[in-house]
């Protein structure tokens, strides 16, 4: 029964490109037809329970079967497999639209309920789950200059990953409209790339805060190596506790952190930001977002990658921020940039497979590459994008038109 259900599911889900499936009983089926731009993949299912697991929850079931070595990819790789499935059902064309089945509705409701809690204790644990797994892994995957674990910016296709990350930093810095002598707060500073960049290009002092002990330690080392110790400080502290200290900043930047806040804490986050920002201050929020309305985190991501995380819709982000008189002065949607970025990370992981397996094991490597494949394709064909939202507390805090952004961005990239 499960085999027949999977065959029916795949016959509807794969029409362009080809997917060959060899079942545990030795039988085989082929789905789809060759088509330009669509991969051709062959997989083998090693036991009879895999079809049932996939039918029950396609993403988690397929992921765990692949991680456990029960779903083997014999032609192509995991990026090809996930691309094939997603490209046949793009969100833009209605592939993810419509009411879910009853079981999926129940599971989504349970997931949403579980995501309603993200207090300070669980936040630190959740961050450690992903970011404290070891800096060595990220050294093998990310760009070597800035250590940016967030969406790069690709104004041209022929850029390297490092060049695209530099372009992202310049793009964000330009939107901050920084003035000499200002105090800048970097919420979720990661390994210090943004703080170092701002300190190198402006006469400012940057305070970075993070909940990851490994990130904080390496960020401080990188700050010292860059020679900006007098202009950058890194603190291991929760943004809620930090806001309670009463300090204020002329500029606030937060890149790739809001996804970890959790939907129940959105208002808490923006209230903290409003309290931390001076009356004429400016803030730039860079976050993964949903193209549609609010949703829930899929089971694979919640279990293996970002427990406690939640990808916000633009509507609920703005609804939370407007309660604290934060004016959304500029909103930009980066539609395809993160897909390009993650494919570069994936290529780096393929090139460094032996080193990653030596750090962890084969099972971790399969889990990590499945994560990257799913992440890249959800930005290319699914419902995810990146938002950059610029906020101000005063309508007079910024120039009246956007020309200053492009001008400053060009100046930074020439310097």
Image (tube, rainbow, N blue to C red):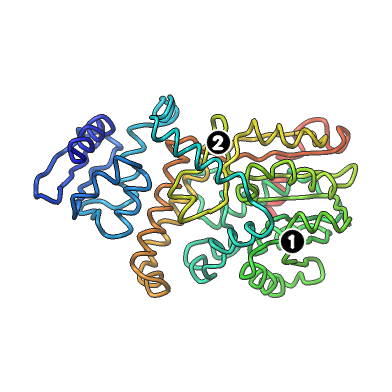
Of 335 and 211, nearer the camera is 211
Mark 1 Cα within 10 Å, few/some/many (few <14, many 20+)? many
Which secondary structure, mark 1?
A: strand
**Residue named by callout 1:** 208
Q: Answer above or below: position of 15 versus 234.
A: above
**Residue named by callout 2:** 290
The picture places residue 235, in percent across and down from the top left corner, at 75, 66
The picture places residue 160, in percent across and down from the top left corner, at 50, 55
The picture places residue 328, in percent across and down from the top left corner, at 75, 34
Please tell me which residue is depicted at 62% across the width and 54% down the height of the picture: 166
Q: Quadrant of the N terminus?
A: top left
Mark 2 Cα within 10 Å, few/some/many (few <14, many 20+)? many
Of 391 and 126, nearer the camera is 126
The picture places residue 72, in percent across and down from the top left corner, at 23, 55
Q: Which of labels 2 and 1 is toward the front?
A: 2
- Image position of 270 (left or right of 133): right
């Amino acid at each position: 029964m499960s085999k027949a259900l999977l065959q029916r599911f795949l016959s509807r889900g794969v029409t362009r490109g080809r997917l060959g499936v060899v079942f545990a009983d030795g039988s085989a089926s082929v789905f789809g037809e060759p088509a330009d731009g669509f991969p051709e993949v062959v997989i083998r299912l090693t036991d009879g329970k895999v079809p049932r697991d996939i039918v029950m929850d396609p993403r988690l079931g397929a992921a765990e079967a692949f991680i456990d070595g029960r779903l083997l990819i014999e032609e192509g790789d995991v990026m090809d497999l996930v691309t094939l499935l997603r490209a046949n059902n793009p969100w833009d064309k209605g592939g993810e639209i419509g009411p879910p089945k009853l079981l999926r509705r129940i599971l989504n409701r349970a997931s949403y309920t579980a995501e309603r809690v993200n207090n300070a204790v669980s936040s630190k644990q959740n961050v450690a789950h992903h970011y404290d797994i070891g800096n060595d892994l990220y050294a093998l995957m990310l760009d070597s200059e800035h250590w940016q674990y967030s969406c790069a910016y690709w104004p041209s296709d022929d850029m390297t990953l490092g060049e695209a990350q530099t372009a992202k930093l310049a793009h964000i810095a330009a939107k901050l409209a920084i003035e000499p002598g200002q105090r800048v707060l970097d919420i979720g500073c990661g390994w210090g790339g943004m703080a170092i960049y701002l300190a190198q290009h402006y006469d400012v002092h940057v305070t970075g805060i993070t909940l990851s002990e490994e990130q904080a330690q390496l960020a401080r080392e990188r700050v010292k190596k860059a020679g900006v110790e007098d202009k950058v400080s890194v603190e291991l502290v929760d943004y809620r506790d930090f806001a309670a200290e009463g300090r204020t900043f002329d500029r606030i930047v937060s890149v790739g952190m809001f996804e970890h806040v959790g939907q129940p804490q959105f208002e808490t986050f923006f209230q903290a930001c409003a309290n931390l920002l001076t009356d004429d201050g400016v803030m730039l929020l860079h976050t993964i977002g949903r193209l549609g309305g609010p949703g829930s985190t899929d089971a694979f991501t919640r279990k293996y990658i970002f427990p406690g995380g939640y990808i916000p819709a633009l509507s609920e982000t703005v609804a939370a921020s407007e309660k604290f008189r934060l004016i959304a002065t500029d909103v930009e949607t980066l539609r395809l940039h993160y897909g390009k970025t993650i494919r570069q990370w994936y290529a780096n992981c393929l090139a460094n497979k032996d080193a990653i397996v030596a750090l962890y094991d084969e099972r971790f490597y399969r889990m990590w590459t499945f994560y990257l494949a799913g992440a890249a394709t959800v930005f290319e064909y699914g419902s995810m994008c990146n938002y950059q939202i610029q906020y101000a507390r005063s309508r007079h805090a910024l120039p009246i038109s956007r020309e200053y952004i492009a001008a400053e961005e060009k100046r930074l990239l020439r310097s």
